[in-house]
Amino acid sequence: MSYGLAQARYASDTAATVSPGRLLTLLYDRLVTDLGTAHEAMLRSDWATSGQRIANASEILLELHATLDVEAWPDGDGLARLYLWMVGELMQARLRQSAQRVADCRELVVPLRDAWRQAGEQLAGTSPSTAPAIVPAGAA
C-alpha cells in the first residue's frame, strides 16, 4: 500500500472512530493549520500552496456550517454567519492575493478552536448524569 493510500485510510479510520466533540476539535486544528500555511505561502508568493490551503480551509468552514445545529444552540446562528463570512473573506483573499485577510480569519478561528477544545475537555471530565445539555457546533 502506498504512503498516500495508507495516510488516507488512517485519516478515514480516525474520523470514523472519534467522538463528535473530538472530531470538531480535529477540524478546527486542521483549519488553523491550513490558514497558517496559506498565509505563509502567500507571503512567499507561493500561489499554488496558498490556493490549495485556502480551498481546504473553505471546505472545513462549509462543513462546520452544514453540521451546525442552530436549533439546539441559541448562539448558533451567529456562528453560522461567521463561518460563511470567513468563506467569503478567503475567496477575496485568494482573488486579491491578500495575506492579511487570511491572517484575519486565522485570528478569529484560533479562539474558537480553543473554546471548543476547552468545552470538550470540561465535558469529558464531567459524568454523564451531571453533564450540561449542550450541542457543540459541528457535532450534530
Image (cartoon, rainbow, N blue to C red):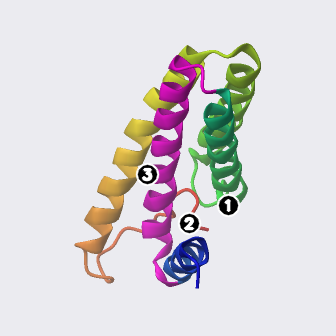
Type of amino acid at the residue the image marks with label 3: Asp
Q: As displayed, is residue 132 above or below residue 46?
A: below
Instruction: Please identify the quarter of the rendering in which residue 123 is found.
Output: bottom left
Instruction: Name the disc covering residue 139, or none.
Output: 2
Name the image quarter holding the C terminus.
Answer: bottom right
Q: Give the CA distance from mark 2 to mark 3.
A: 15 Å
If you read the primary sequence from the N terminus, does the residue marked by circle 3 or circle 1 appear first? 3
Query: Which mark is in front, 2 or 3?
Result: 3
Type of amino acid at the residue the image marks with label 2: Ala
CB-based contact (under 8 Å), mark 2 and mark 1 = yes
Position of 55 with respect to 3 (left or right) is: right
Residue assigned mark 3? 29
Q: Is residue 39 magenta?
A: yes
Q: Main secondary structure of the magenta part?
A: helix
Q: Give the CA distance from mark 3 to mark 1.
A: 17 Å
Residue assigned mark 1? 67
Q: Which residues are magenta?
A: 17-46
Q: Residue at x 30, y 54 (%)?
A: 118
For the residue pair 8 and 98, the one nearer the viewer reads as 8
Type of amino acid at the residue the image marks with label 1: Thr
Q: Is residue 73 magenta?
A: no
- Work out which residue is located at the far front of the displayed protein and give it: 2
* Element class at badge 3: helix
Instruction: Please identify the quarter of the rendering in which residue 97 is found.
Output: top right
Q: As displayed, is residue 137 above or below residue 77?
A: below
